Structures are given as structure tokens and as C-alpha cells.
Image: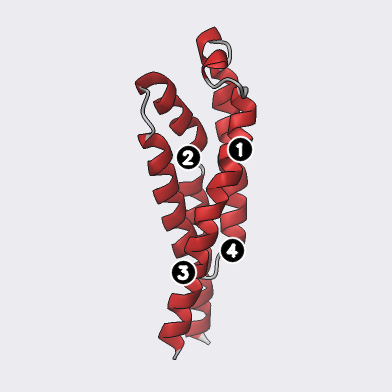
Amino acid sequence: MKNKILLVLRKIVIGILIVCLYCFPFVYFSMHQDFANRSMLGYLIMIVVTSLLAFFGKLFNNSISLIIGNILSVIISFYFINEMTRNERWGGYFKPLTPYQLLILVSFLNLIPQFFAMKLANRHKNKVKD
């Protein structure tokens, strides 16, 4: 009984940690790096970090944390992008898309590597069970 309680507690703590890590505005950070430094490194960092979070989230059975975390990341990125759109150069930099359209596009595309990371975590869990 005590072990089950510890497992549930561990799952909850890991879920909260994953949501907190997802609260970083990944898309805004990537767009800002692109705008300020003309660098795609921000997008690469976003893909790697969110894929790792998705892998560990699925490994510890925290799929709900991944969904909540992705939503919060988009909301926080939206807030910061909204603040930056007051800069006229920022708004025109991402043409033909607006910054908001790019936020939605990049957020959606970022789900693809996370999906693959979750599949990889499932395979890893199945190998460990066997």
C-alpha cells in the first residue's frame, strides 16, 4: 500500500515538474532568437527540449501534463509575442505570416517531434516490461 502511494506521489510530482518546465515560452524564445540574431538555434533548442519533456512525460505516464504544458507554453508565448508586436520591425519580420500565425504554425509543427518522442518512450517501456 505504501509503495502505491509513493508511486502515485512520484507521478504527481513529475507531472507538476513537466508542466512547470513546459511553461517556458518556447515559440516566443525561438522567434526572438530568429529576429534578434537571425539564428535558427532557438527552434532547434525548442524541438530538443520539448521532445525530451515529451519522452520523460510519457515514460512516467503523464500524458495530461504534456497537453497542459503545451497549452500553457503557447499561452505564455502569445503573451510575449503580443508585447513584441508593438515593435513594427518585429511584426514585419516573419512575412508572409503574422507573428501570431507563426506562433500557431510552429506550435503545431512542434507537436510532431513530441509525438515521435512519446512513441519512443512507449517502445522503451515495452522493452523494459519484457
The alpha-carbon separation of the residues under discs 2 and 1 comes to 18 Å
Q: Which residue, given by chain and number where applicable, does mark 3 sit on?
A: 120
The alpha-carbon separation of the residues under discs 3 and 1 comes to 24 Å
Q: Residue furthest front?
A: 96
The alpha-carbon separation of the residues under discs 1 and 4 comes to 22 Å
**In the image, what residue type sits under mark 4?**
Ser
Q: Report crowding for label 1: few under 14, some 14 to 19, many 20 or more residues within 10 A (C-alpha).
A: few
**In the image, what residue type sits under mark 3?**
Leu
Q: Earlier in the sequence, mark 2 or mark 3?
A: 2
Element assignment for label 4? helix
Residue 3 vs residue 17, the one in the foreground: 17
| Residue 24 disc label | 2
**In the image, what residue type sits under mark 1?**
Leu
Q: Position of residue 62 (x, y in %)?
A: 55, 65
Q: Position of residue 96 (x, y in %)?
A: 61, 21
Q: Which residue, given by chain and number where applicable, does mark 4 sit on?
A: 63
Element assignment for label 1? helix
Q: Earlier in the sequence, mark 1 or mark 4?
A: 4
Q: Position of residue 55 (x, y in %)?
A: 46, 63
Q: Earlier in the sequence, mark 3 or mark 1?
A: 1
Can residue 14 be seen here? The reply is: no
Query: Total label count?
Result: 4
Taking the spot 51% from the left edge, 43% from the top edge, the residue there is 23
86 in relation to 81, above or below: above
Contact between marks 4 and 3 (CB within 8 A): the answer is no
Taking the spot 56% from the left edge, 24% from the top edge, the residue there is 81
Q: Which residue, given by chain and number where applicable, does mark 1 sit on?
A: 105
